[in-house]
Image (tube, rainbow, N blue to C red):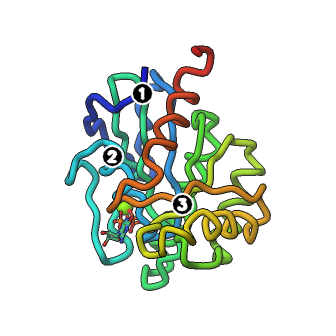
Amino acid sequence: MDFTIKNARFITSVGLGSELPEKRAAEIAIVGKSNVGKSSLINSLCGRNKLAKTSSTPGKTRLINYFLLNEEFYLVDLPGYGYAAAPKSEQQKWGRLMEDYLSSGRVDHIYMLIDIRHEPTAHDRQMFGYIIYYGIPYTLIATKADKLAKTKRKQAANAVAKQLGAPPYAVAYSSESGDGKQELLQRIDAVVHPLSE
Ligand SMILES: Nc1nc2c(ncn2[C@@H]2O[C@H](COP(=O)(O)OP(=O)(O)OP(=O)(O)O)[C@@H](O)[C@H]2O)c(=O)[nH]1
Ligand SMILES: [Mg+2]
């Protein structure tokens, strides 16, 4: 049977110095630069407009936000990086928060998001380096696919992965049109239910 998201609820926000929730479920974290569409992806996967807060201004998500889906696994919305207008102190805080989180050993899978129209930035490369360093399984997702013609999406998504130095495949995703949603759901199913057929 097709895997679907039957329900989703916000659990908690975590900042520097506060405790992560008890690890009771598989955990999938969403990383990427500010404004790339992390919070929007959560909303579109869950079929909810306002579950995760989104904004056209970068730097909207400032904390680690836990959502529990199907009472079964966590989807974790993270603050974006590369938000140039943020003060240095804020950027340092972000670095510590992310490093503590990614090195905690509790992340089962990472979705790394990159805008389908742009080359990966120095910050993207650094983040990808962390993912490889910590050995966390990941999937690359090229966001805002609706901004390109349908015929160009797959190739552009794969090009982004290649530019990052990863195996040349990324899911082309759009929170607006739902492109890539079925593929992502199948991939989540495989992470959450690794032994089922
Ligand atoms: N066209 C289009 N716009 C999108 C898509 N996903 C997100 N956006 C827009 O991009 C902007 C940023 O989206 P967010 O989901 O808030 O981005 P974020 O990565 O969570 O940003 P931070 O919380 O600042 O790190 C919003 O204006 C969204 O409407 C998409 O698939 N297509
Ligand atoms: Mg956000």
Mark 1 → mark 2, Cα distance in angstroms: 27 Å
Which is nearer the eye, 54 or 100? 54
Mark 3 element type: strand
Between circles 2 and 3, the one closer to the viewer is 3
Task: Bin the neighbour count of mark 1 within 10 Å (Cα to Cα): few under 14, some 14-19, many 20 and up.
Answer: few
> Is 189 located above or below residue 167 in the figure?
above
Q: Mark 3 points at which residue?
A: 113
Sooner in the amino-acid sequence: mark 1 or mark 2: 1
Q: Quadrant of residue 127?
A: bottom right
- Amino acid type, callout 2: Ser
Quadrant into which the N terminus falls: top left
Mark 2 → mark 3, Cα distance in angstroms: 21 Å
> Is 159 located above or below residue 83 in the figure?
above
Q: Give the x, y percent position of residue 84.
A: 49, 83
Residue at (27, 39) in percent of width and height: 10
Sooner in the amino-acid sequence: mark 2 or mark 3: 2
Q: Mark 2 points at which residue?
A: 13
Whether label 3 lies within 8 Å of ligand 1 gets the answer yes
